[in-house]
Image (cartoon, rainbow, N blue to C red):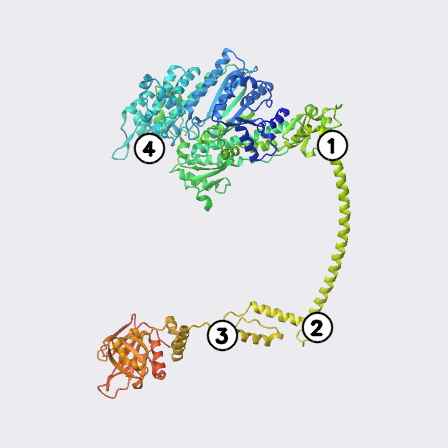
């Protein structure tokens, strides 16, 4: 049980040793306490029995033999938090209760999980009873670590010794507490690392250890050079040599460890031969023949692989360049492309390495196996990958994060279960705890026939062209509405910007992770072509032969996919863990740059969130955070109550009840169990502790409180009586005002009704106010709804009978005012245009519909500056009124010529550049003819008495209406203008006639017809 005094004393040290004692369970308070302790190199803190560990990135002197001795057999909370305290309490609880336990070590890469696992193993190796046999078992457990790390760990961007597999190790103890055996389960080795590493990362340690540390004779036997740059599988990350890793020293440790775990020299040589064969495989290069099929060029590397694996070189070459297809009883070899050959090469490398790792784990288990059949208890160590979010997340991150989802689910279930059991033992009612149940996310991944893994498997197994993108489409179809799943296609506009088309995003309990589907199918299938499997079964390398023979070659069934295997192994792990008592270590990285003493608050906050630490604290604090035996509680706090001081004569439970009642505990702050008092909030306990410290001053404080209460009650009573009197007077005043207001309202309403009834009569005292109201109301409405333009004749408000005459006067005044404003706003130019337009309308009222808009607003005449100076001097005395360009048609032959037509006060002049070609006096102008079509033709009919005198003038003017308007005004010839249909007769000279004929056609034309007439054709459009 919790040593409360020790925990309470922690308040006076650096920070709080147990987060459960925090007065505020906020994230800010949590981080502040963590930071305060970290700054003093106190890297361990409790949440109840959960241990939070922050990686200091430096050596601390807290793991010595002296420290181990200090924590042996000591109550959990008696000493400052330490990993040894947790290991020791798990061990002693196991011995006392003779049941199984496990320690779950979690955290992200680089947080110190592997180191924590080592520290626990070291502690058990030192603290458990010692015999020669037991020492051998301990040595094997301890030395299994370097071997598993060499083959299963690698440098990543976040951690120089990152475990790329999950590990669960059972340590078996007999009834005396002696460590007598062990067993390791491994989960999901990251085999893809064998053939590909991201920039800044390395392959598994063993490759570099062999190349850098291997003896010269060994390297010669394996065909290797002492240069990592020589091997394709070691150089992709461009960081083969790392200053923080001593591969030579590690090589020696691994060789020694292999001997300790009983791997003999022959198997050791086979093991190193396999490692070397993988490196040679990576150097095999393919070329393409004329048909694009893969050819093997580098026969030297192929021969080394053949020798090291003990297989036929020709068969190996065939297996890497051809696929064996079975058709009924026949076998057909189908050649590979280069891409397929590379895939087959990499698949073989991954398969060999993966199976070898499994073989190694099995050999470690054989060496640690306890042959005694008597009952054992175990403590399991689960060192498994933490939640991973990289820039690009692939199939491995998907599996790892699914594993974390399952463990989070288990974590919450076990925590709640442990709490519930204690409540039931003490007969305290269990209160449901609100927490995020991530079952919805687990189901999203693992549900049969509907989960992501099932859909991935279906896509891997179905016939046809299944690709990563078709898998993504299937996901979108199946779970498009799931709240924790989104893709580029399903996302809203803002989210879509953060997703590529080949991505899907899962909202895990720890936050959002975006996965790229590229490679999902290949990694899930993890297929190795059958002819290569058959070849590996014939290997003379004992390890390879054993590994591949365990695969059921005779079965024609397709092997289980990687995701399904991982899902099954997780379910089995969950079953194993559910049958054990749980202890937890949560490892945190203090910063990304591995600097000692640097506390990155944002990074820590993120880890606290996804490790569920706040959630665990809430569960731990959701019911009653503290439990204490009645005897202990009463012994400490009895001075605080006169009834219990100095001695309590009854049962401890009754004394505690009297004490807490006296201390003022609220009913919801505590509960009385069978043997313990349960206290809900730490602040309640702190208040009690503070009261204990202030005990000698408590009486004076109580007296003061009582007296102040008495005085306050008297004062309150007086104030209440005064307030009642004031309220009574105020209500009377308000009631009288209300009565007066209502009387006035009745009078006004009566008067209004009378006025309405007599509204048609002459003005009287009864209706005068009503009529005034009607007038005012109408005028107000009229003010808001006055017509806005002179042309608006319809929107004037209809007046009531009493205002008909007034309304008409106002209407006229308003329209006159708008007209006046409009007239005042007209400019001289605008006025000239309007005058000209009105003249045209007057002259040609029936044709105005056909006027161009531009004519109505812009005059087209030529200015004096456009007339030749000589012509201007000759006719200036006649006052030039108007000039316009025309096309004149000669009387003989109707030849067109451009001319100017100038209108003066007395005559019209036809001008050719500087010559006056013809002068037509207005007095001799007997008629003007135009056609009813849009051809712009004009004929001046001129009085022709002398045969030598020129006849009628035929011309074409683009500004017809403007010209005729000007002419009619200047020469006063409005009555002689005629609109003719079909033909205009013209007099060429005295006694000689011709005609201008008009017609319509597809395009305008003017030409001399065969009959000698002038033919004018225009597009059909007539004046009516």
Q: Is residue 837 above or below residue 481?
A: below
Residue at the (27%, 28%) spot, across then down: 297
Q: Secondary structure at mark 1?
A: helix
Q: Nearer the viewer, mark 3 or mark 4?
A: 3
Q: Which residue occupies the foreground of this view, 337 or 924?
A: 924
Which residue carries the number 2 mark? 766
Q: Secondary structure at mark 2?
A: loop
Which residue carries the number 1 mark? 700
User: Which of disc 1 and disc 4 is earlier in sequence?
Assistant: 4
User: Which of disc 2 and disc 3 is earlier in sequence?
Assistant: 2
Q: Nearer the viewer, mark 2 or mark 1?
A: 1
Which residue carries the number 3 mark? 820
Residue at the (53%, 35%) spot, across then down: 438
- The Cα–Cα distance between marks 3 and 1, rounded to whole angstroms, is 95 Å
Q: Quadrant of residue 514?
A: top left
Q: Nearer the viewer, mark 3 or mark 1?
A: 1
Q: Position of residue 619 (x, y in %)?
A: 59, 32
* Residue 828 in sight in this render: yes
- The Cα–Cα distance between marks 4 and 1, rounded to whole angstroms, is 90 Å
Q: Secondary structure at mark 3?
A: helix
Q: Quadrant of residue 561?
A: top left
Residue 340 numbered tag: 4
């Amino acid at each position: 049980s919790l040593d409360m005094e020790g925990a309470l004393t922690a308040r006076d040290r650096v920070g709080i040793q147990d987060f459960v004692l925090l007065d505020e369970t906020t994230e800010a308070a949590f981080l502040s306490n963590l930071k305060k302790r970290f700054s003093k190199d106190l890297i361990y803190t409790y949440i109840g029995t959960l241990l939070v560990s922050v990686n200091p990135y430096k050596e601390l002197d807290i793991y010595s033999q002296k420290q181990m001795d200090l924590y042996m057999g000591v109550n959990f909370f008696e000493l400052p938090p330490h990993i040894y305290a947790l290991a020791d309490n798990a061990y002693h609880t196991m011995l006392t209760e003779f049941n199984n336990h496990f320690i779950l070590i979690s955290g992200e890469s680089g947080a110190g999980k592997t180191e924590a696992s080592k520290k626990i193993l070291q502690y058990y190796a030192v603290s458990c009873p010692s015999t020669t046999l037991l020492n051998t078992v301990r040595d094997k457990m301890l030395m299994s670590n370097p071997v598993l790390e060499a083959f299963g760990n690698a440098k990543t961007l976040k951690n120089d010794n990152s475990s790329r597999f999950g590990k669960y190790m059972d340590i078996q103890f007999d009834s005396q507490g002696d460590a007598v055996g062990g067993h390791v389960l491994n989960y999901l080795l990251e085999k893809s690392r064998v053939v590909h590493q991201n920039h800044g990362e390395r392959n598994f340690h063993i490759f570099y250890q062999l190349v850098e540390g291997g003896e010269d004779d060994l390297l010669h036997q394996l065909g290797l050079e002492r240069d990592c740059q020589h091997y394709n599988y070691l150089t992709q990350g461009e960081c083969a040599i790392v200053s923080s890793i001593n591969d030579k020293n590690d090589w020696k440790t691994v060789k020694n460890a292999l001997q300790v775990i009983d791997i003999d020299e022959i198997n050791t040589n086979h093991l190193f031969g396999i490692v070397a064969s993988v490196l040679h495989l990576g150097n095999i290069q393919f070329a393409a023949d004329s048909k694009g099929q893969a050819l093997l060029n580098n026969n030297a590397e192929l021969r080394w692989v053949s020798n090291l694996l003990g297989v036929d070189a020709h068969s190996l070459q065939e297996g890497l360049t051809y696929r064996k297809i079975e058709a009924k009883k026949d076998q057909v070899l189908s050649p590979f492309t280069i891409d397929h050959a590379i895939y087959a090469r990499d698949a073989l490398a991954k398969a060999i390495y993966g199976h070898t790792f499994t073989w190694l784990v099995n050999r470690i288990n054989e060496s640690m196996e306890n042959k005694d059949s008597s009952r054992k208890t175990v403590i399991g160590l689960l060192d498994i990958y933490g939640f991973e979010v990289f820039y690009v997340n692939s199939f491995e991150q998907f599996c790892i994060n699914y594993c974390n989802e399952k463990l989070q689910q288990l974590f919450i279930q076990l925590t709640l279960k442990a709490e519930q059991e204690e409540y039931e033992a003490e007969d305290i009612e269990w209160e449901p705890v609100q927490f995020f149940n991530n079952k919805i996310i687990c189901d999203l991944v693992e549900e049969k026939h509907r989960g992501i893994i099932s859909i991935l498997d279906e896509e891997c197994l179905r016939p046809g062209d299944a690709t990563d993108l078709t898998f993504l489409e299937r996901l979108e179809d199946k779970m498009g509405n799931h709240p924790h799943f989104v893709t580029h296609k399903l996302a809203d506009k803002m989210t879509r910007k953060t997703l590529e088309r080949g991505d899907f995003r899962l909202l895990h309990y720890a936050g959002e992770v975006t996965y790229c589907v590229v490679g999902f199918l290949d990694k899930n299938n993890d297929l190795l072509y059958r002819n290569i499997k058959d070849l590996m079964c014939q290997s003379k390398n004992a390890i390879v032969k054993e590994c591949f023979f365990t695969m059921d070659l005779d079965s024609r069934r397709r092997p289980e996919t990687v995701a399904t295997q991982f899902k099954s192994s997780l379910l089995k792990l969950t079953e194993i863990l559910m049958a054990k008592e749980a202890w937890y270590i949560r490892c945190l990285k203090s910063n990304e740059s591995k600097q000692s003493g640097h506390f990155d608050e944002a990074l820590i906050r993120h880890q606290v969130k996804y490790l569920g630490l706040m959630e665990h604290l809430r569960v731990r604090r959701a019911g009653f955070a503290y439990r204490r035996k009645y005897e202990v509680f009463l012994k400490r706090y009895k001075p605080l109550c006169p009834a219990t001081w100095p001695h309590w004569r009854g049962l401890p439970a009754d004394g505690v009840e009297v004490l807490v009642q006296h201390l003022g505990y609220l009913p919801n702050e505590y509960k009385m169990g069978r043997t313990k008092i349960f206290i809900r909030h730490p602040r309640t306990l702190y208040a009690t502790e503070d009261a204990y410290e202030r005990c000698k001053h408590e009486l004076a404080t109580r007296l003061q409180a009582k007296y102040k209460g008495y005085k306050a009650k008297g004062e309150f009573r007086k104030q209440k009586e005064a307030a009642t009197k004031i309220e009574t007077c105020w209500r009377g005043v308000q009631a009288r005002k209300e009565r007066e207001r209502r009387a006035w309202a009745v009078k006004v309403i009566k008067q209004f009704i009378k006025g309405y009834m007599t509204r048609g009569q002459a003005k009287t005292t009864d209706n005068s106010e009503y009529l005034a109201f009607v007038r005012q109301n109408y005028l107000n409405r009229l003010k808001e709804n006055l017509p806005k333009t002179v042309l608006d004749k319809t929107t004037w408000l209809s007046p009531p009978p009493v205002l008909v005459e007034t309304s008409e006067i106002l209407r006229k005044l308003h329209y006159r005012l708008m007209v006046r404003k409009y007239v005042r706003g007209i400019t001289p130019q605008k006025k000239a245009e309007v005058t000209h337009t009105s003249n045209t309308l007057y002259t040609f009222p029936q044709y105005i519909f056909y006027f161009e808009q531009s004519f109505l607003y812009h005059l087209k005449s030529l200015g004096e500056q456009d007339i030749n100076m000589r012509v201007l001097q000759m006719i200036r005395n006649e006052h030039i009124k108007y000039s316009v360009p025309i096309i004149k048609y000669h009387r003989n032959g109707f030849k067109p010529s451009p001319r100017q037509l100038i209108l003066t006060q007395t005559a019209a002049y036809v001008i050719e550049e500087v010559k006056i070609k013809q002068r037509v006096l207005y007095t001799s102008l007997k008629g003007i003819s135009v056609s009813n079509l849009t051809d712009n033709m004009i004929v001046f009919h001129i009085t022709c008495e002398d045969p030598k005198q020129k006849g009628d003038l035929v011309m074409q003017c683009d500004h017809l209406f403007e010209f005729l308007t000007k002419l009619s005004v200047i020469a006063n010839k409005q009555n002689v203008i005629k609109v003719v249909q079909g033909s205009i007769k013209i007099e060429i000279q005295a006694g000689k006639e011709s005609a201008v004929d008009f017609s319509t056609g597809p395009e305008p034309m003017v030409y001399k017809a065969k009959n000698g007439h002038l033919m004018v054709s225009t597009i059909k459009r007539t004046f009516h």
